[in-house]
Image: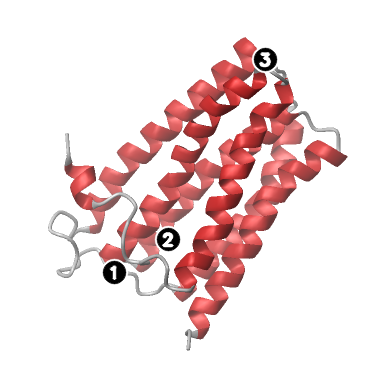
């Protein structure tokens, strides 16, 4: 029988994934937000998820863990390596997205619209952060690697979706959002369910310490 903590974490993760996915789409379809604004909200959500994952590890993981992987027995080393890769990946994704939106699609943005959309999304991100901080405590560094690498997957997803979206935008401009929405739905909604039912090893990071240590 699954522990109550696992059940709570699954419920919160699924609710968060649904609303984070649905809010920008609802604003696009029913509030006349341009699709470019929806995509920027998703990009900001990816950045926020990385920051919150780092903060969660800082709060509930030990500063030193003798049971950690050979490279990551110290929390500071894990976070430093992760931050370099994650924020580098995220910066590249946002750069390509911005160049595509401004130079190719000639898009314009309403900062107020994006702020409202991101504010609504942030409510659910913070709820998931609190859930993780409570239900994952204490978090060994091996599991912290997993948490961080999965949040970095959001940046990788954004990067991949931008390139796929460029091809679809050649047919219909608005279609460039579709690849990201579909990929995000499969990952954010499907992965917690797989982990809960034991089809993913929750302690096995998508990017291992050996991967991070490679030049």
Evaluate whether residue 190 shows in this view: yes
Residue 137 rendering spot, x and y as whole percentages: 39, 74
Question: What is the secondary structure assignment of the residue under circle 2?
Answer: helix
- The answer for how far apart the CA atoms under marks 2 and 3 are is 37 Å
Q: Gap between marks 2 and 1, in whole Å?
A: 12 Å
Vertical position of residue 150 compared to residue 176: above or below:
below
Percent x, y for residue 106?
68, 12
Closest to the camera, between mark 2 and mark 3, is 3
**Front residue of this view, candidates 144 and 172:** 172
Query: Answer yes or no: do the residues labelled 2 and 3 have beta carbons within 8 Å?
Result: no
Which of the 4 image quadrants contains residue 128?
Answer: bottom right
Tell whether label 1 touches label 2 (CB within 8 Å).
no
Q: Which callout, 2 or 1, points at the residue further toward the start of the chain?
A: 2
Specify which label sits upstream in the sequence, 1 or 3. 3
Dot 1 and dot 3 residues touching (CB under 8 Å):
no
Question: Disc number at residue 56?
Answer: 2
Q: Can you identify the residue that label 1 sits on?
A: 140
Q: Name the residue beneath numbered marker 3.
A: 105
Q: Secondary structure at mark 1?
A: loop
Q: Residue at coordinates 63% horizontally, 42% vertically from top-left? A: 181
Query: Is 69 placed above or below 10 here?
Result: above
Residue 190 location, quadrant: bottom right
Residue furthest bottom as drawn? 1
Q: Classify mark 2: residues with Cα within 10 Å, few (<14), some (14-19) or many (20+).
A: many
Q: Is residue 66 left or right of residue 40?
A: left
> Looking at the image, is mark 2 or mark 3 earlier in the sequence?
2
Q: CA distance from mark 1 to mark 3?
A: 45 Å
Q: Going 63% across and 32% down the picture, which residue do you hit?
A: 40
- Residue at 52 percent across and 36 percent down: it is 158
Using the image, tell me which numbered label, if any, was put on residue 2. none
Picture residue at 19% right of the left edge, 64% below the top? 68
């Amino acid at each position: 029988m699954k522990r109550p903590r696992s059940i709570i974490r699954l419920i919160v993760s699924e609710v968060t994934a649904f609303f984070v996915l649905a809010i920008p789409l609802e604003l696009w379809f029913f509030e006349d937000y341009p699709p470019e604004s929806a995509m920027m909200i998703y990009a900001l959500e990816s950045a926020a998820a990385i920051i919150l994952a780092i903060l969660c590890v800082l709060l509930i993981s030990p500063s030193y863990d003798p049971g950690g992987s050979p490279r990551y027995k110290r929390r500071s080393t894990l976070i430093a390596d992760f931050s370099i890769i994650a924020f580098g990946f995220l910066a590249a994704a946002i750069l390509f997205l911005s160049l595509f939106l401004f130079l190719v699609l000639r898009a314009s943005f309403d900062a107020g619209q994006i702020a409202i959309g991101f504010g609504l999304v942030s409510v659910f991100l913070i709820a998931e952060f609190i859930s993780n901080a409570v239900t994952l405590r204490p978090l060994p560094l091996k599991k912290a690697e997993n948490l961080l690498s999965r949040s970095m997957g959001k940046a990788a997803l954004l990067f991949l979706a931008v390139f796929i979206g460029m091809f679809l935008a050649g047919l219909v401009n608005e279609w460039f959002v579709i690849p990201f929405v579909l990929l995000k739905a499969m990952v954010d909604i499907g992965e917690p369910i797989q982990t809960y039912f034991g089809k993913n090893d929750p302690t096995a990071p998508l990017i291992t310490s050996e991967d991070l240590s490679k030049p």
